[in-house]
Amino acid sequence: MNFFKSHRSTIGFLAVAVLFIAVVQVLLSMGLLNNFWNTLLRFGAVMAIVSLGLNLIYGFNGQFSLGQWGFYAIGAYAAADVTYRWDQMQSASGLVVLFLVVLLVGLSFWGIAKLISLMRGMDPLSGFALYLVGVLVAGYVAIELGKVLIDPVTALFSVLPPAFALQLIFFLAVILGGLIAAEVSYIFGLPILTLGSDYFGIATLGFTIIVKVLLDNSDTLLGFTEMKGARGMVGIPGVSSWLWVSLFLLVTVIITRNLLHSSAGRALISVREDEIAAKAMGIDVAQQKVLTFVLGSFFAGIAGGLYAHINGFLHPNTFNFIKSFDPMIIIVFGGLGSVTGTVFAAFAWALVLEGFLRLWLPQGFETWRFVVYPVLLLIMMLLRPKGLFGGFEVPFLKQVLPPLRKSAESDSKSLPPTSEVKQ
């Protein structure tokens, strides 16, 4: 019965999701929704993805993080550089080098983790230094190896139809942007995940500020002249369609749901409830923190890659530390630990803040929307502290547990009466 109930909820959820995506696409194709609302819907989906990642870290795992926006920026600029080089320079150099960096850095992490497991008693800072050396070596090898592979890979993609090649490179760029953000979060999280929640939040906020400063000087300090530093990066192909962002959001929701319903998901939630009790039950708390932090950062990198290709323009001011509070506001508004609330609040945040309030407020008073929505948030938190949805989830996102009480009753009925046992 539980299997069929779960199966029915899955079919219902997918049917509603596909129907919603299709209806919006039809309205966009017919011109009933103009480019303004199209941009807001795509931006809402992107904010839902980055907020789901933060909800995993904070809402489900209990780690107060303000670094989500930094990983969002890393994914955005990494993916944008790949597609920019292909679209403007007709070169797959960005794709080849980024792929090799992700691959070799991942292999170095795997090898170093095996080495550290054999070396008992290594402190976190020493392990961090070892990982850092591995990253530098892997990055150098990736760049040198990429020089050999750039021309053959460029020739291979040039054979494909131009429109299809751009879409394929865009897809790969978004995935690689998420992976590079995840790898950065892994090496960054090794030393700071040992900190307490408040100190962890301060450290991640510092990370966001560092990323923003590096982006301001990306053309001089990092050598990426096409990013143009504080002037902003232009010429990015606008290929993040509604279908792309909605499908990425749907996959993100499914991954999050399946993770939370697994044994690993139960373990990461137990860390939020009580770390000491989780350790007593044999759960590797440090490993669960790292896993959640990396996966949440991966979602942020994916969202950043999608965002970079909506307007075709990136500026470091978009990723300053003030904006890093936006996903935090969304998950608090929707409800900590609620996937349904996070998705709804992300769309509501984009449509209300940048849509309805901008249109409804008198001309010249558009900036008052930054006063109105905090007031609405304050009122809601006073009336409903658990958020708009609290712990509510749609049936597909709820975990269907076996009827333990019924099974216990059936077992008790199958046993002989106590009097018969005595006889």
Image (cartoon, rainbow, N blue to C red):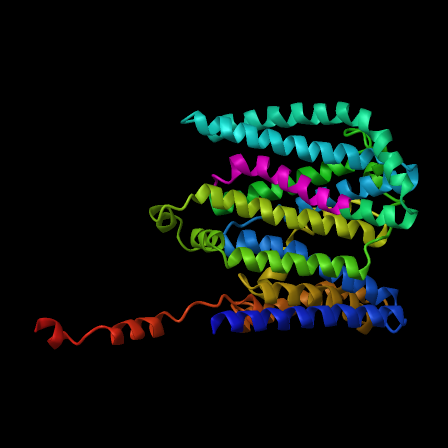
Up the image or down, 379 lies above or below 286; here it is below
The correct choice, above or below, for 265 with respect to 204 in the image is: below
Closer-to-camera residue (83/201): 83
**Percent of width and height locating residue 392:** 53, 70
The residue closer to the viewer here, 388 or 422, is 422
State the image coordinates of residue 290 (x, y, percent, origin top left): 52, 42
Residue 340 % position (x, y) = 60, 67
Task: Locate residue 376 relative to residue 64 in the image: left or right.
Answer: right
Q: Quadrant of the C terminus?
A: bottom left
Point 79% across, 68% down: residue: 355
Visible residue check, residue 119: yes
What segment carries the magenta color? 172-195
Predominant SS along the magenta part = helix
Q: Nearer the viewer, residue 20 or 404?
A: 404
Residue 178 within the magenta-colored segment of the rendering: yes
Q: Confirm whether the magenta stretch covers residue 136.
A: no
Residue 326 shows up from this direction: no
Residue 53, position as x, y percentages in the image: 61, 53
Question: At 86% across and 47% down in the image, what residue appears?
Answer: 166
Q: Quadrant of residue 26?
A: bottom right
Residue beneath the point at 19% across and 74% down:
416
Q: 213 or 32: nearer the eye?
A: 32
State whether residue 291 is above or below residue 144.
below
Give the side of residue 227 with respect to residue 415, left or right: right
Q: State the image quarter where residue 220 is shown.
A: top right
Considering every residue shown, the one lying at the far left of the view is 423
> In this picture, is 211 found above or below 276?
above
